[in-house]
Image: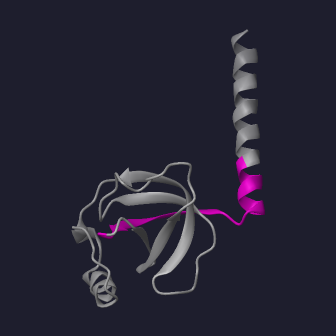
Amino acid sequence: MKRKTLVIGLASVLALLLICVGVMTCNNLSFRAGRCIKAANGSCMLLMDNSPVVLYNHTLSAHPFSDYRTGDLLLVLHDGIQETYPGGTGAYLTLRLQKGTAGDIPQAVLNALTELDWVIEP
C-alpha cells in the first residue's frame, strides 16, 4: 500500500514538472536569480548581470513586491527582457531566497539609476 502511494506521488510530481516545463517553453518564460532594487515609487527591479531590470506585475497578487527590500536575493519567473535602460520584464512568480541590504548592490548601478531620476529605497 505504501509503495503504491509513493509511486502515485512521484508520478504526480513528475507530471506537474512536465506541465511546468511545457508552459515555460511555450510562453518563453525563464527563471532568474538576482538582487532586488526597490524604488521609492513602489517599483521593483532585479539586478541581472549588473544591469537593473524593472519587474512588471503579472502575478495574481496586487502588491507582490511589497515585502522585499533593496539587496534581497530573489528568484523570478519572467518573460522576455525589453532592451531599454533599465530593461523591463513581466514577473509571474517571485520568491525571496535570502535577505540582503543596499550594500549588496554595486554603487555604480545605484549612481546610474539616480542619474535617471530613480529614487532607490535603502
From the image, which quarter does the N terminus lie in? top right
Task: Tell which residue pokes out farthest to the bottom in this image.
Answer: 115
Which color scheme does this rendered protein use? one colour
Which residue is at the front of the view, 99 or 87?
87
Residue placed at 27% from the left, 86% from the top? 111
Q: Is residue 42 magenta?
A: no
Kindly identify the residue that appears in the image at 31 percent across and 85 percent down.
Answer: 117
Q: Is residue 32 magenta?
A: yes
Q: Position of residue 14 (x, y in %)?
A: 73, 38
Seen from the viewer's position, the closer of residues 3 and 104 is: 104
User: In this rendering, is residue 5 above or below 36?
Assistant: above
Q: How many marks?
A: 0
Residue 39 lies, in percent from the top left, at 32, 70
In the image, is 25 to the left or to the right of 105? right
Q: Is residue 102 left or right of residue 85?
A: left
Q: Is residue 78 above or below residue 15?
A: below
Q: Quadrant of the C terminus?
A: bottom left
Residue 66: x %, y % from top left: 36, 54
Relative horizontal placement of residue 64, taking residue 11 as reference (left or right): left
Q: At which x and y percent is residue 19?
A: 76, 46
Q: Which quadrant of the figure has residue 113?
A: bottom left
Q: Residue at x 24, y 63 (%)?
A: 101
Quick check: 21 left or right of 68? right
Quick check: 96 above or below 52? above
Residue stretch in magenta: 20-40
Residue drawn 43% across and 66% down? 34
Dividing the picture into quadrants, the one containing residue 2 is: top right
